[in-house]
Image (cartoon, helix red, strand yellow):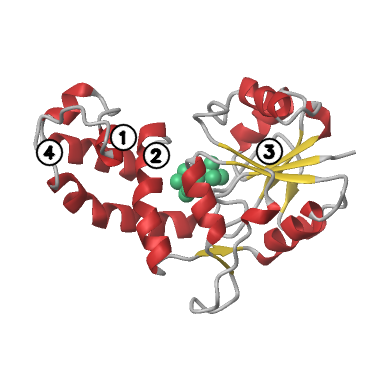
Amino acid sequence: MVSDIILDIEGTICPISFVKDVLFPYFLRQLPALLDQYQYPLLEDVSDPVKTILLKFPRDKTAARDSLYSHIKALVDNDVKDPVLKELQGLVWAKGYHEGTIKAPLYEDAIQGMYTWSTRKDKKVYIYSSGSVQAQKLLLQYVRGINEPEAAPGKDLNGLVSGYFDTTNAGPKIQPTSYSKIAETINTSPDECLFLSDNPKEVAAALEAGMQSYLVVRPGNAPVESAPAAKISTFAQLDL
Ligand SMILES: CSCCC(=O)C(=O)COP(=O)(O)O
Ligand SMILES: [Mg+2]
């Protein structure tokens, strides 16, 4: 029996292309002006939330504006799941979401699954993504069905979610201990948890921690030769 459904975001409930072609370019467009606000080397200022995040990057990178820019750009270009980058991205994306420039296209079956499971007494829905918890909440606050026009009124799905996990509060997604920690945090036995992700290494880690798991295959995802679990291409295939 599955009591807790834990969802990955990119490649599972929304297309990878939304992250690569919309979110990352938006962040890189805002980055130069954001860094230009400060004097270098960056000095501690607890009253400034952006500066507080920037100061978590390696000290040698924060000595000059251009070295900091190059460091952050390289992390984005190489899709490094760096927790400090993810924290900064969440803060920058907030502007785009709140201004209406960004709206997240979610697969219709994922939206339907989240509604169906979260309204059942015996099930709860959680998110576990490399994106920061702030970025997860924003993404789910401004949702459109993938087949709806971009101008469609946004839906806020946060009411369907019982908890959010990222690499800061749970740990890296390819480590089994992160999944054990999530199960412990939500007070559930791992075998009652179902983790859905597009990443075979994440699926393998969840299985090793004793969770149930499927590999989610969506258009545009990287091809997977040997999957550690059965594959699904829509949440409608699940009979929970
Ligand atoms: C939820 S924030 C945008 C996506 C992102 O930055 C990311 O790294 C997504 O990784 P995931 O673990 O959801 O595949
Ligand atoms: Mg993913």
C-alpha distance separating marks 4 and 3: 43 Å
Q: Nearer the viewer, residue 50 or 174?
A: 50
Image point 82% across, 29% down: which residue?
191
Quadrant housing residue 61: top left
**Residues under labels 2 and 3: Cα distance?**
31 Å
Task: Determine whether 227 is above or below 154 in the image.
Answer: above
Q: Which residue is mark 4?
A: 65
Badge 2 is on which residue?
87
Residue 220 appears in the picture as rendered: no
Q: Residue at x 48, y 45 (%)?
A: 134
Query: Quick check: 42 left or right of 121?
Result: left
Q: Position of residue 149 (x, y in %)?
A: 53, 79
Q: Amino acid at mark 2?
A: Glu
Q: Residue furthest front?
A: 47
Q: Name which residue lies at 12% across and 28% down.
A: 63
Which structural element holds mark 1?
helix
Label disc, if present, on residue 227 of the rendered structure: 3
Among numbered discs 2 and 4, the one appearing first in the sequence? 4
**Residue 205: x and y, percent?**
65, 27
Q: Are marks 2 and 4 in contact (CB under 8 Å)?
A: no
